[in-house]
């Protein structure tokens, strides 16, 4: 196996869709500080979530997120557990229940559909657009989203992790609050937070490790939650208690904080991160486009994800050989999601350009020398 291009010789290039590759600097710092946080003398894993040391970590992480995403004073940021999947329920519990309106869902892929399914347990759901007829290979064209009369909110999935389609511009939803599931492109590029009623994102794709979900909510949205909600499922509880109404996932918050610091200090912010990500994705899309159909991209070119590059080879047998040959070169976890098949290369923030270049070179070689 040729790992000469990898910065750490016994690490592979890991294209996992999530949990996913982390910045090396972040892991090295976590390793160095694991036994004793500087100035504390105990591990982050051992100290109280109400200690001044953890207070500082949580507050600095919030401030860093506010700077990175330009979150204004109209929005609160909270850290929750239960993954993005719990937000599929919490969003309608808090924003739809008792509203008398429908919640509008734009179904661009697996995650958008799953969100809508959970919302139906809480109230009326209107499917404002559905990509099923073209197998979720695109986003709604201009004017295709049909909103209900007075939606409680309009839900989109910023990046469909499984199909590999990503919004490049936010849709116009009039005065309705826009809710975005940003789980798989959170912190990969700037977000226009001011245009959102609510944003949620689990951390384990781009922003850290499993266990913490970030919710950014416009303050007036909080007035919609009803008093019959279970305490821990009510956004107001977490805002009121500064994300510490019970024990938060301390290690996951700490890692999110390190990732934020890496984005600010090493990368230089989200616009710079976005430029890197677009350039990395282009390396692979150029191979697709130049392969005369050997590599057939799933997403329509104008909706291609910079995070998850999805494509098929001429046969399943070739796809199997492609995945096996990649492992020999230290390129792992390239198999597509079982629901769509094919290949998926997840190239989140922390995937180094060397990893993408290695994959690109392998793709070119494989097409040239493919077994008959
Ligand atoms: C991974 C993912 C989820 C599910 O996240 P969990 O934290 O596993 O619940 C939801 N939405 C999107 C877009 C995702 O990529």
Image (cartoon, helix red, strand yellow):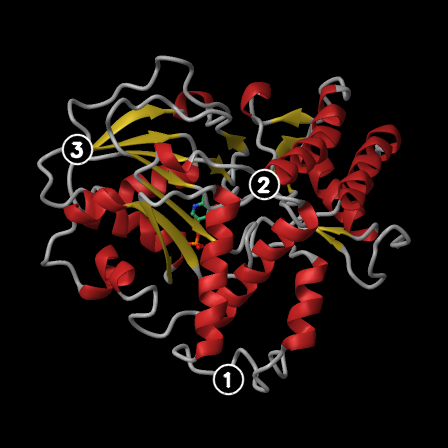
Residue 270 — which label? 2
The answer to whether any part of residue 57 appears in the image is yes
Q: Quadrant of the N terminus?
A: bottom right
Which numbered disc, 3 or 2, marks the residue that appears first in the sequence? 3
Q: Is residue 372 above or below residue 248?
A: above
Q: In the image, is 82 to the left or to the right of 305?
A: left
Q: Residues within 10 Å of mark 2 (few under 14, many from 20)?
A: many
Residue 300 in percent (x, y) is at 56, 20
Residue 345, by quadrant, is top right
Residue 362 in percent (x, y) is at 83, 38
Q: In the image, is 167 to the left or to the right of 99?
A: right
Q: Residues within 10 Å of mark 3 (few under 14, many from 20)?
A: many
Residue 102 — which label? 3
Which numbered disc, 1 or 3, marks the residue that appears first in the sequence? 1
Tag 2 and tag 1, C-beta contact below 8 Å: no
For label 1, the residue is 46
Residue 9 in percent (x, y) is at 85, 61
Closer to the observer: label 1 or label 3?
A: 1
Residue 32, by quadrant, is bottom right
Q: Distance between the Cα atoms at labels 1 and 3? A: 45 Å
């Amino acid at each position: 196996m040729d790992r000469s291009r990898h910065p750490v010789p016994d690490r592979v290039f890991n294209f996992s869709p999530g949990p996913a590759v982390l910045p090396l600097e972040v892991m090295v710092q976590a390793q160095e500080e694991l036994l004793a946080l500087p100035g504390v003398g105990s591990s982050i894993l051992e100290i109280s979530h109400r200690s001044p040391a953890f207070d500082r970590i949580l507050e600095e992480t919030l401030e860093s997120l506010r700077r990175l995403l330009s979150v204004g004073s109209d929005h609160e940021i909270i850290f929750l557990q239960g993954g993005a999947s719990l937000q599929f329920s919490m969003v309608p519990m808090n924003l739809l229940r008792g509203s008398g309106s429908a919640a509008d869902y734009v179904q661009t892929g697996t995650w958008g559909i799953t969100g809508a399914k959970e919302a139906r347990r809480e109230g009326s759901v209107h499917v404002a657009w559905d990509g099923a007829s073209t197998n979720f290979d695109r986003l709604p064209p201009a004017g295709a989203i049909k909103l209900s009369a007075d939606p409680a909110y309009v839900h989109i999935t910023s990046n469909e992790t499984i199909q590999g389609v990503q919004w490049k511009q936010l849709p116009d939803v009039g005065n309705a609050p826009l809710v975005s599931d940003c789980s798989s492109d959170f912190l990969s590029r700037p977000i226009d937070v001011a245009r959102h009623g609510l944003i949620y994102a689990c951390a384990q794709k781009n922003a850290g490790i499993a266990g913490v979900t970030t919710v950014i909510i416009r303050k007036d949205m909080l007035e919609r939650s009803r008093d019959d909600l279970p305490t821990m499922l009510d956004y107001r509880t977490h805002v009121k208690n500064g994300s510490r109404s019970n024990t938060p996932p301390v290690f996951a918050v700490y890692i999110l904080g390190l990732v934020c610091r890496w984005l600010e200090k090493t990368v230089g912010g989200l616009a710079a991160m976005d430029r890197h990500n677009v350039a990395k994705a282009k390396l692979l899309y150029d191979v697709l486009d130049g392969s005369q159909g050997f590599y057939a991209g799933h997403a329509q070119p104008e909706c291609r994800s910079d995070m998850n590059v999805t494509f098929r080879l001429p046969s399943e047998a070739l796809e199997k050989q492609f995945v096996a040959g990649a492992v020999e070169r230290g390129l792992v976890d390239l198999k597509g999601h079982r629901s769509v098949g094919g290949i998926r290369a997840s190239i989140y923030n922390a995937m180094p350009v060397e990893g993408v270049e290695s994959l690109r070179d392998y793709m070119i070689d494989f097409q040239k020398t493919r077994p008959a």
